[in-house]
Image: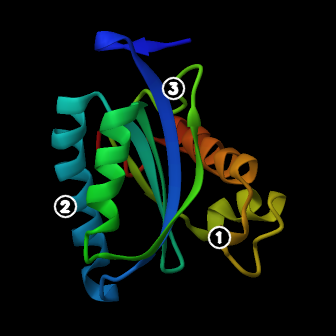
Amino acid sequence: MDRTPGSRTLHQLIYSSRVRIPWPDQDREVESIVHTSIRNNRLVDVTGLLLVHEGWFVQALEGPTEAVLATYSRISGDPRHEDCKVLHAAPAERRSFEDWNMCARRMTPADDAILETLSMRASFEPYALTGLQVLRLLKSVRGIQRRTQLAALG
């Protein structure tokens, strides 16, 4: 099992929340979230990916258990999020998003194939996803992100 400094167990947490940022300000605010997250996450060895789609955030956090839980606690109290719900939380063998202390991607019509695979093209409902489905979604987004490097901010 992958260990981080101090032999702390690697943990992965994926949550979803409703975006509480007015539409005209979303891109700027998401960029601010990512830049702040990169700085904060580097200090505590957290990596992850943030997906923004149709008024939803879906985010994976991974790193030492204490750091991941503290990061999620801070996020769930952030007024830019509403109705935070953990979709998956478990120890992890290795990081899935090790390339980024934080990276964000907004789904576009070109990404519809990912949603089609998950039978969510007509209606994106992250709360209805199982842990395995949400991890599969974010890993698919990771693959696109790596290939295109669009919106890679970290």
Taking the image as shown, residue 128 lies to the left or right of residue 60, namely: right
Which element carries disc 3, helix, strand or loop?
loop
Taking the image as shown, residue 96 lies to the left or right of residue 114, namely: left
Identify residue type, mark 3. Arg
Q: Residue at x 55, y 20 (%)?
A: 94
Q: Is residue 100 visible?
A: no
- The image's mark for residue 95 is 3
Vertically, is 134 above or below 10?
A: below
Q: Residue at x 55, y 31 (%)?
A: 96
Could you give the CA–CA distance between mark 2 and mark 3, rounded to whole angstroms?
Answer: 24 Å
Coordinates of residue 19 in the picture (x, y in percent): 40, 78
Q: Which of the two discs, 3 and 1, labels the residue nearer the N terminus?
A: 3
Mark 2 is surrounded, within 10 Å at the Cα level, by few (under 14), some (14 to 19) or many (20 or more) other residues, namely few
Which element carries disc 1, helix, strand or loop?
helix
Q: Residue at label 1?
A: 127
How many numbered badges does the structure rendering display? 3
Mark 3 is surrounded, within 10 Å at the Cα level, by few (under 14), some (14 to 19) or many (20 or more) other residues, namely some
Q: Is residue 136 visible?
A: yes
Q: What colouring method underlies this structural image?
A: rainbow
Could you give the CA–CA distance between mark 3 and mark 1, rounded to whole angstroms?
Answer: 23 Å
Coordinates of residue 140 in the picture (x, y in percent): 66, 45
Identify residue type, mark 2. Ser
Q: Residue at x 40, y 33 (%)?
A: 65
Quarter holding the N terminus?
top right
Vertically, is 32 above or below 127?
A: above
Coordinates of residue 44 in the picture (x, y in percent): 23, 31
Which one is in front, 98 or 3? 3
Which one is in front, 21 or 94? 94
Could you give the CA–CA distance between mark 2 and mark 1, rounded to whole angstroms?
Answer: 25 Å
- The image's mark for residue 32 is 2
